[in-house]
Image (tube, rainbow, N blue to C red):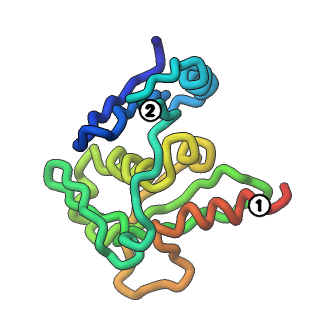
């Protein structure tokens, strides 16, 4: 189906279900279609159909720095080591933000860095939440001196939940 992708995950154990995730690859124009396809999916005993790429991290692992690093070409990053700061503006639910990395100056030449950060945020938030809540991401070097206003990346979902609970 145009605009949609399918991700199949075969189980490690015999009694687990095959999982098929229907994704719009972050394109909001296809979000409704993804939901329609999964709703219309047949009920099969050994299959589980899921809408959108779902969050993949356990909060406790991230908080304790026990998350596995993302390795892509010459980049090695852990979500637990990233911080962010939202830009300040009124009455907006979709945020612009700066993501701070320890080694930004080392990695800044890599054209895939921003794409990797988006991939990490998708694993943290899930596909739909990422594209419904994040408008723009800028990258920067994590300051040597810790600033109190920076928020741990693993708290991004809590930040968004709080923001979305506020009246417009």
Of residue 75 and residue 166, the one placed in the foreground of this image is 166
Of residue 9 and residue 23, the one placed in the foreground of this image is 9
Left or right, 39 with reference to 90: left
| Residue 120 coordinates in the image, percent (x, y) | 38, 53
Point out the frontmost of discs 1 and 2. 2
Residue holding disc 1? 165
| Residue drawn at (71%, 62%) of the image | 163
Q: Residue furthest top?
A: 1
| Residue 73 coordinates in the image, percent (x, y) | 15, 48
Mark 1 or mark 2: whose residue is earlier in sequence: 2
Of residue 106 and residue 68, the one placed in the foreground of this image is 68
| Residue 138 coordinates in the image, percent (x, y) | 46, 55
Of residue 9 and residue 2, the one placed in the foreground of this image is 9
| Residue drawn at (52%, 33%) of the image | 51
Judging from the image, what secondary structure is the residue with disc 1 in?
helix
Residue holding disc 2? 48
| Residue drawn at (25%, 56%) of the image | 70
Left or right, 94 with reference to 136: right
| Residue drawn at (23%, 43%) of the image | 12
- Tell me if I can see residue 5 in this picture: yes
- Tell me if I can see residue 29 in this picture: no
| Residue 10 coordinates in the image, percent (x, y) | 27, 34
């Amino acid at each position: 189906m145009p605009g949609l992708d399918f991700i199949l995950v075969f189980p490690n154990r015999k009694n687990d279900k095959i999982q098929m995730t229907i994704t719009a690859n972050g394109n909001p124009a296809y979000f409704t279609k993804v939901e329609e396809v999964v709703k219309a999916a047949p009920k099969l005993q050994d299959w589980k159909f899921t809408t959108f790429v779902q969050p993949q991290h356990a909060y406790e692992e991230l908080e304790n720095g026990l998350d596995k690093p993302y390795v892509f070409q010459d980049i090695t990053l852990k979500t637990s080591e990233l911080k962010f700061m939202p830009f300040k503006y009124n009455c907006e639910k979709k945020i612009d933000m700066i993501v701070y990395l320890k080694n930004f100056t080392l990695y800044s030449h890599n054209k895939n860095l921003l794409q990797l950060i988006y991939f990490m945020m998708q694993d943290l938030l899930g596909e739909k939440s990422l594209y419904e809540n994040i408008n723009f991401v800028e990258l920067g070097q994590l300051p040597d001196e810790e600033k109190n206003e920076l928020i741990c990346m693993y708290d991004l979902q809590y930040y968004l939940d709080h923001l979305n609970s506020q009246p417009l």
